[in-house]
Image: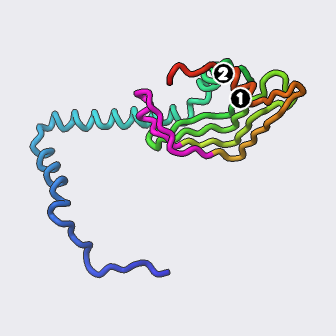
Amino acid sequence: MEPLKQDGPAPRLPWYNRLPTALARYAWARLPPRTQRRIQRTTAVTLIVLFVLQLVLKFGMTGPAKTVGLPAFRSFIHAPADLESFGISLLGGKARITGLKIGNPEGFNEPDMFTAEDIRVNMGILRGCIGIIDVDRCRVRDGHFNLIINSGGETNLLKLLASIPPSPFP
């Protein structure tokens, strides 16, 4: 396949598409040099902070998730649970959980009720800062769910759901 060839220079954008850039350049040129330097420093510091925050959320969340989040989750569901890694992409609005295992409640022989090698969730993370998380899409790869009935006639899922306290929200 041949690359597209263009005859002559690129077409010029109409004036209404160039106007915001021209106004921004005009306004920037009229600012005092001290103010320009302050704006440049503030922008650079903001970008560096966002970059470091993204790195921490992407690669540094496994430790806190295992030490703080996982014990709270275990006590909430009253069953064993484990995960390999956890990361959040702040700018992409994605979360990724790898190696999630949720064990069976007491009274069942099988070790795991649910296992998933990779879980990816697309959500509005920035809105989560105010307490609202909208999940757009959730994809589970290599997920296995074992529904087991013990000798007493109980299923592992119903026993697990019965041990979870009801939500205080309607």
Indicate the amino acid at tag 2. Answer: Ile
Which residue is tagged 2? 164
Percent coordinates x, y for residue 71 in the rendering: 66, 19
Left or right: residue 8 versus residue 121 is left
Left or right: residue 2 versus residue 77 is left
User: Element type at marker 1?
Assistant: strand
Which residue is tagged 1? 82
Magenta-span inclusion, residue 133: yes
**Nearer to me, 154 or 133:** 154
Residue at the spot 40% in from the left edge and 78% down from the top edge: 4
Furthest-right residue in this view? 151
Sooner in the amino-acid sequence: mark 1 or mark 2: 1
Percent coordinates x, y for residue 14 in the rendering: 18, 66
Tally the marks: 2
**Nearer to me, 84 or 112:** 112
Q: Nearer the viewer, mark 1 or mark 2?
A: 2
